[in-house]
Amino acid sequence: MSPTPRTLAQPVRAPRRALTLAALVVAGSASGLACAARQPLPPEQSADETFADPRCAPVRGYTGDAMEPFVTRDGRYLLFNSSNAPGAQTDLQVARIDGDLAFTYRGPLTSANSTALDGVPTVAADGTLFFISSRSYATTGATVYTAHFANGTTDAPVLVAGMPREPGIVLFDVEVSADGQRLYYARGVFGNGSGPTAAELRVAVRRGNTFVPD
């Protein structure tokens, strides 16, 4: 059974790089949301302080859920997707970064969005955007798209050439290296349920205009 767009509703994310958002929670709210208190660890567990002092980061002018945050490498924009709950329209969104923990919503990333699920944005230093979309999975078996991101907008997205297409397999998460030479992606095995029965992280390396699984 081919996965439906909602099959991609619960992506497993690899850790983001240590930029402004590495130690905070993005909260979609026009007025700001209070951060929940951190719960103490059981005595037998030690705290991992690699990332510490999480703080709320409300996106001014945005009232929905803000998921899968990505800060562009020039520090100018926050990209994220809206809710991927069943029945929701999941779209890529963009906000301007006005300072430390100051984000102003600019709107949906219209040129990249479709009527299907569009999410998990990641951008290389040269502005090449990669994201996941289920728009053509039924006919192509592919989900990884790319476009050029500049000044808060994109051109028309196209499928990333070279990424594997296998029956019953969905690539449901993606991250690009800063130099744009590697894609890290999640390969999920899907059956009749709403989520993968197995998943693993893999790497693809750029070869000219295509990416070849390593």
Image (cartoon, rainbow, N blue to C red):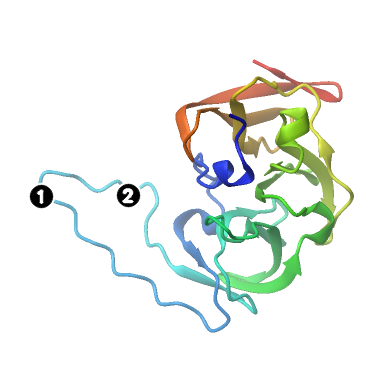
Farthest-out residue, left: 43
Which numbered marker is on residue 63? none
Q: Quadrant of residue 184?
A: top right
Residue drawn at x 33%, y 70% is 36
Q: Amino acid at mark 2?
A: Glu
10 Å neighbourhood of mark 2: few (<14), some, or many (≥20)? Answer: few
Q: Is residue 183 above or below residue 148?
A: above
Residue drawn at x 62%, y 75% is 62
From the top left corner, tell me how far across and down residue 128 is, in percent: 80, 42
Q: Quadrant of residue 209?
A: top right
Q: Nearer the viewer, mark 1 or mark 2?
A: 1
Q: Amino acid at mark 1?
A: Pro
In this picture, residue 147 sits left or right of residue 19: right
Q: Is residue 173 above or below residue 42?
A: above
Residue in the foreground of this view, choosing between 38 and 126 = 38
Q: If you read the primary sequence from the N terminus, does the residue marked by circle 1 or circle 2 appear first?
A: 1
Numbered marks: total? 2
